[in-house]
């Protein structure tokens, strides 16, 4: 049926006759059924609601002109609908000149379609691009210096378990240009940085997680099963009653037994120390000639203050860094942010490789919400990995820009196999069987391509790609850098492919 609205003839549904009459004073033709003439609740509000549900973001003036109404009246009515959560107001159109209105469901659909279009726009890169991107994203080789840079690095590495023997020698020193243990000690002494054990690796090493103290409570994961011998209970009791203690306050009748039990609690994530000195003393035993007799281990190097691996004050982690489990969603949100900051481009494999409780499923809802809010992008960024990939906007551009230098020679990078910047063995598979993310092992990447793998101990060298004469010299030259950088005292290869012999000799190796 035709009615006159805003000076124009409009075709409307007959069942809307009463609505247009009551909302706009429209004249109706005779002979309409009584059912179409019943009074309508909030006729003008319902007309505006229908307009909003069938239009993209709009200004107040658009429905006002459509229905021939004063702009002030329409603005007031739209504002009421916004208060009810039916409309949103903001700057939605990129070419808009004023604030606009949009129905909540319409905006959700527009965002979903926009996100879907964005996902299709990005052509995935190959796996080696990720291996070039990730070390650069994490600042490996950065020129940044000092405490400020170290805090940035710790913030990015929060919650990832790293072997103590690798932490300073390979991970922190590769990201802070002037790194020295004194920098980390300063942050520990100031209470800015704390560490928590995450499992032993033999007798003289173990995995540790770094945290900024302000984030430790919400990011620290629940510990594994607790050791339960009498000595473990005794140490817990003392630390519970007295708080932070020196080892001499903790030692029982047998110092060796007490110290071993204390380190059991450390690796279980129950006890920490206000210093990094015990970790350094423990891992230094691996490279120090030991004069201890076979059988029961002794206390190791001693000072007038006691065994070196017992230095500092020990405290219960739950007392010093209480976990905040009050709002699980908040922890998931913070964890997702840290993971994105660490990886730039986050995949299911990356999260699973770090061993977080709940895996990728624990942060997936948060990542989806972040995508809908426009904080991250979802897409198929790296070929060969799962479809559920999330990335910070700047990370996508840097990933796609991570191309090899075609004019110069290949760029070599030596990473500890366990370095979080090494994607192989976590997000990406090793190209051959054998290599592992083992403490003390190294991988040499050439433009992101895994080329050589040096096993722990530096005696076996595994080739990770086909020989073609284009990469061997650069990879072996980089291998020599492990000694030059003092990451290894010496390099004495016992097992390697014979094809590498000429290249090794050219690089200075002798039989």
Image (tube, grey):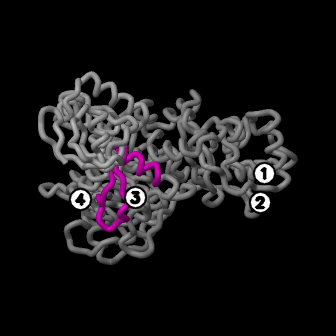
Task: Name the residue located 34 percent from the left edge and 29 percent from the top edge.
Answer: 77
Which label number is shown at residue 347?
3
Residue 96 falls in image quadrant: top left
In magenta stretch: residue 185: no
Residue 371 percent coordinates (x, y): 36, 48
In magenta stretch: residue 382: yes
Question: Which residue was labeled with disc 4?
Answer: 120
Question: Which residue was labeled with disc 1?
Answer: 256
- Foreground disc of the pair 1, 4: 4
Whether tag 1 and tag 4 are in contact, CB under 8 A, the answer is: no
Rounded to the nearest angstrom, the CA distance separating label 2 from label 1 is 9 Å
In this view, the residue in front, 397 or 388, is 388
Q: Secondary structure at mark 3?
A: loop
Name which of mark 1 and mark 4 comes first in the sequence.
4
Q: Secondary structure at mark 2?
A: loop
Rounded to the nearest angstrom, the CA distance separating label 4 from label 2 is 62 Å
Q: Is residue 253 left or right of residue 378?
A: right
């Amino acid at each position: 049926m035709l009615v006159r609205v805003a000076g124009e003839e409009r075709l409307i549904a007959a069942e809307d006759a009463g609505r247009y009459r009551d909302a706009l004073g429209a004249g109706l033709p005779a002979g309409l059924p009584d059912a179409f003439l019943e009074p309508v609740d909030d006729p003008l509000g319902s007309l505006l609601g229908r307009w909003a549900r069938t239009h993209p973001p709009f200004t107040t003036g658009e429905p006002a002109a459509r229905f021939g109404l004063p702009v002030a009246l329409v603005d007031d009515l739209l504002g009421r609908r916004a208060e009810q959560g039916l409309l949103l107001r903001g700057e939605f159109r990129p070419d808009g000149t004023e604030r606009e209105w949009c129905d909540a469901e319409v905006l959700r659909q527009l965002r979903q379609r926009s996100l879907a279009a964005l996902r299709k726009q990005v052509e995935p890169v190959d796996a080696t691009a990720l291996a070039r991107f990730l070390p650069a994203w994490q600042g490996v080789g950065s020129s940044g210096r000092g405490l400020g840079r170290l805090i940035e690095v710790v913030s990015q590495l929060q919650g990832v378990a790293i072997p103590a023997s690798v932490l300073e020698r390979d991970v922190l020193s590769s990201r802070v240009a002037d790194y020295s243990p004194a920098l980390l000690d300063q942050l520990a002494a100031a209470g800015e940085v704390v560490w928590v054990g995450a499992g032993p690796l033999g007798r003289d090493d173990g995995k540790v997680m770094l945290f900024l103290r302000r984030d430790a409570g919400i990011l620290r994961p629940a510990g594994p099963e607790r050791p339960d011998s009498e000595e473990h209970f005794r140490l817990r009791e003392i630390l519970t009653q007295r708080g932070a203690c020196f080892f001499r306050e903790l030692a029982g009748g047998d110092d060796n037994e007490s110290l071993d039990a204390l380190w059991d609690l450390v690796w279980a994530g129950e006890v920490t120390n206000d210093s990094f000195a015990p970790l350094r003393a423990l891992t230094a035993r691996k490279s120090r000639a030991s004069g201890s007799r076979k059988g029961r281990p002794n206390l190791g190097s001693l000072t007038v203050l006691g065994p070196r691996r017992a230095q500092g004050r020990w405290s219960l982690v739950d007392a010093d860094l209480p976990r905040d489990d009050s709002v699980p969603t908040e922890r998931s949100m913070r964890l997702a942010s840290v993971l994105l900051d660490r990886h730039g481009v986050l995949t299911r494999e990356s999260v699973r490789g770090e061993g977080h409780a709940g895996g990728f499923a624990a942060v997936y809802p948060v990542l989806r919400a972040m995508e809908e809010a426009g904080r991250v992008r979802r897409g198929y960024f790296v070929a060969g990995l799962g479809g559920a990939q999330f990335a910070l906007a700047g990370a996508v551009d840097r990933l796609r820009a991570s191309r090899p230098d075609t004019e110069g020679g290949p760029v070599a990078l030596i990473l500890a196999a366990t370095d979080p910047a090494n994607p192989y063995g976590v997000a990406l598979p090793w190209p051959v069987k054998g290599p592992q993310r083992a403490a003390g092992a190294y991988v040499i990447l050439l433009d992101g391509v895994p080329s050589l793998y040096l096993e722990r101990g530096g005696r076996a060298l595994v080739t990770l790609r086909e020989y073609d004469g284009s990469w061997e010299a650069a990879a072996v030259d980089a291998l020599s850098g492990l000694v030059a950088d003092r990451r290894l005292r010496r390099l004495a290869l016992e097992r390697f492919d014979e094809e590498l012999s000429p290249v090794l000799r050219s690089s200075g190796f002798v039989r």
